[in-house]
Amino acid sequence: MTILVTGAAGFIGYHTSLALLERGERVIGVDDLNDYYDVSLKEARLKNLEGEGGFTFHKLDIADRDAMEALIRQHGDVTRVIHLAAQAGVRYSLVNPYAYIRTNLEGYLVVLEACRRLERLEHVVYASSSSVYGANDKLPYSTADRVDRPLSLYAATKKSMEMISHAYESLFGMPLTGLRFFTVYGPWGRPDMAAFIFTRKILAGEPIEVFNDGDMRRDFTYIDDIVAGVLGCLDRPPEAGRAPGRLYNIGNNISEPLMRFISILEEALGRKAEIKFQPMQAGDVKETCADIDDTRRDFGFEPKTTIDEGLPLFVRWYKEYHS
């Protein structure tokens, strides 16, 4: 089986591609290796993938129509697509909003149009986000909840992707499934995420900023559980004739206090954090938690890794990587 993975040099894309290769699939990886965060980390992930048999990489911008069409002509045997390429980050959307429109909306449209040219297409799985729940105050978040009150441009683009998907499913019968990821962490993680930021600063003896005076809770989800959810979904395309708009939460189903998250990191690092409490940031939410009943029912998703287990694994990787 040949599978196209966009954002293959990213955090989730890297681990997903590696898991696909390990089970014997052929993977066509796409990434533009932009400088939103340290490119050397993306290159290191990519180097690991290129050391595996069955991996082919194309450096290109998914919003480049000519490049994507040429890719599809070259790899017409692709049967499944995992679309993970995106401009990530809630806070960065306050600084560079245009990047979100180009990659998350224009880029996704180009990917969908390219997929329409695949004669043997079986399934497209695309990344949405828990950020779409925005100002919702009902927990846990359910895919049946209304999500028309985004608190950031990033969230608005992810909700827009879901709506575009619904239209393409209705118009062209495309087999599309959206996955709303909840706060992902683990080895090879993104430097703009809490685990990475806190670890770097604690080891450097620098203070860490903790927002809303520490009164925050998150559904932290370990990368291996995320990948298990992606592949479980990928292997179960929508049934023929099923109503369009299939969406699932991929989370841990546990809302952990941020201060407990920090205390586990401190223990794993063997150092205490110097904390600077700050007010809530624009676009942020106080608490997240995923309702995963549908995900369990439809493809047997069951998260296995708690933060007590996952954070020490991240710390071990961080120290090895930066040694």
Image (cartoon, grey):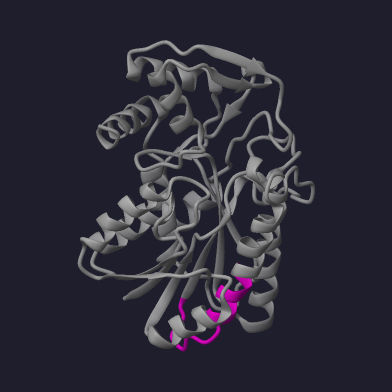
The correct choice, above or below, for 77 with respect to 56 in the image is: below
Q: Quadrant of residue 321?
A: top left
Query: Can the viewer see residue 60 in this picture?
Result: yes
Closest to the observer: 72 or 144?
Answer: 72
> How many numbered dots are placed on residues in this image?
0
The correct choice, above or below, for 137 with respect to 3 in the image is: above
Q: Which residues are magenta?
A: 108-122
Residue 228, position as x, y percentages in the image: 38, 51
The correct choice, above or below, for 204 with respect to 188 in the image is: above
Residue at (57%, 31%) from the top-left corner? 218
Closest to the observer: 294 or 9?
Answer: 9
Q: Is residue 111 magenta?
A: yes
Query: Can the viewer see residue 300 in this picture?
Result: no
Q: Is residue 257 magenta?
A: no
Residue 211, position as x, y percentages in the image: 64, 23
Q: Quadrant of residue 134?
A: top right
Residue 272, position as x, y percentages in the image: 42, 10
The correct choice, above or below, for 54 with respect to 319 in the image is: below
Residue 140, position as x, y percentages in the image: 63, 37
The quadrant of the image that shows the N terminus is bottom left
The single residue placed furthest to the right in the displayed view is 149
Residue at (63%, 73%) from the top-left corner? 109
The quadrant of the image that shows the C terminus is top left
Residue at (28%, 29%) from the top-left corner? 319
In the picture, measured across the screen, residue 187 lies left or right of residue 30, that is left
